[in-house]
Amino acid sequence: MKFIKYFLVGILFGIIMTKSEAISWFRIQEMFRFESFHMYGIIGTAVVLGVIIHQVMQRTGFLSISGEEPKWKIPGSAKYRYIIGGTIFGLGWAMTGACPGPMFTLLGHGIWSMLLVIASAIIGAFAYGTISSKLPH
Amino acid sequence: MIEFLSQPWHWAVSGAMIVFVMFLLLWFGGRFGVSTNLETMCTIAGAGKVSDFFKVDWKKRAWNLVFIAGAVVGGYIAITYLSSPEPVDIAQSTRDYMTTIGIDYPASISEGNGYVPAEVFETPWSVRNLILLVVGGFMVGFGTRYASGCTSGHAISGLSNLQISSLIAVIGFFIGGLLMAWLILPWIMSF
C-alpha cells in the first residue's frame, strides 16, 4: 500500500512532463539552439523555487512522513565523473530528445520506438556498471 | 476544468509543479532522481552476477520504479484526455532549421503534436534512425550513471540543493548537448 502514493505522484509527473512540453524532442533542440526561453524558464523556475524549499526545509528541521531526515545529497564525492558523464549524457539527450523520465512518459504517449531508447539506456547503465572501476572518477 | 488543463502550460507553472513533485518525493522519504531506475532494472535482471556494482538491495529502490510506472500512465492520461489543440509551439527559427536537416514540423495537430519527429520515431528500423535511438539511448544510460544523475537528479534536485557537483554535471549536459545539436546531429541527419 505504501507504493500507491509514489504511483500517484508518478502519474502527476507524467502529466506535468507532457503539459510542460519538456519531453518534446523539438523543445530540447530549441533549447540547445538558444531559440526559445521555454526550457530555461521551466528549469530556472524549478531551481529558484527548489532552493527556497530546500532552505526552508533544512532550516526548520523538516522530517519525512516516517519521521526521518529527507535524503538531501547524493553520497560520495569525485572530480571527473560529473563533467565526463554529464557530457556523454548531454550527447544522448540531444540525440534522442529524451532524458530518463521523459522516455517513459513518451512510451505512455504510444511512441513505441521509445522501447528501443529505454532498452539501450538500460544496456548503457549496465555497461557503465561493469567497467566503472576502470573509469576515472 | 479539462479544457483549462488542456492548454499548453506556462513555463513558470511547469517549473513550480516539478518542484511540487520533488517536494512530495522528499516528504515521502524518497528523492527526485529518475536515472537510478536504469541501474535498478539491471539489478533486477540479474546484473549482480556480472558485476558487484549491481549488488544492491533493489527493494529499497522499488518506490522509484513505481514512480516511473506512474509516469508512463501519466503520459497516457495527458495525451489522451488533456491533449493540446495545437502542436507544441516551437520557435519559428527552430522549425525552419529542422526543415534544412530533413525534419518537417507539423503545421497542425492533424499532422502531429510536435513531441517527437516522425522522420525518426515512426521508422526506427532504418540504419540512421537505429543509430540515433540506440546510440543515443546508450549514451543517456551510460552518461547518467557515470555522472550519477540526470536532469531530475542534478539539474533540479542537485542545483536546488546547491551542490557544486550538480552544477558541473549540468555544464557537462550542455557541452554534450551543444556538440550534438550544432555539429553531430546535422551530420547524422544528412544520411
Image (cartoon, grey):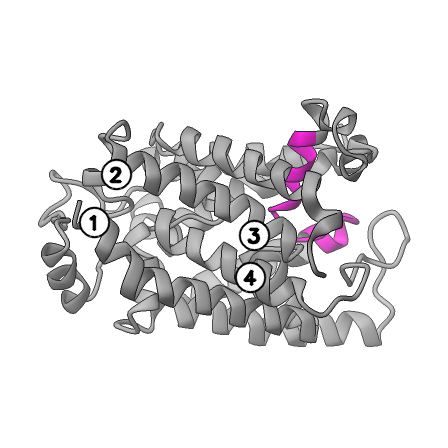
Residue at mark 2:
B128
Label 3 to label 2: alpha-carbon separation: 21 Å
Label 1 amino acid?
Met
Are the residues flagged by discs 4 and 3 in contact, CB closer than 8 Å? yes
Say if labels 4 and 3 share a chain. no
x and y percentages locating residue B30 in the rendered image = 75, 48
Label 3 amino acid?
Gly
Q: Is residue A60 above or below residue A3?
A: below
Residue at mark 4:
A86
The stretch in magenta equals B25-42
x and y percentages locating residue A43 in the rendered image = 48, 68
Say if labels 3 and 2 share a chain. yes
Residue at mark 1:
B189
For residue B125, which quarter of the picture?
top left
User: Is any part of residue B10 visible from this angle?
Assistant: no
Q: Secondary structure at mark 2?
A: helix
Label 4 to label 3: alpha-carbon separation: 6 Å
Residue that protrudes farthest toward the front in the picture: A134
The answer to whether residue B134 is magenta is no
Label 2 amino acid?
Arg
Q: Judge by depth and name the residue closer to the eye, A88 or B1.
A: A88
Q: Residue at x 72, y 50 (%)?
A: A134
Label 4 amino acid?
Gly
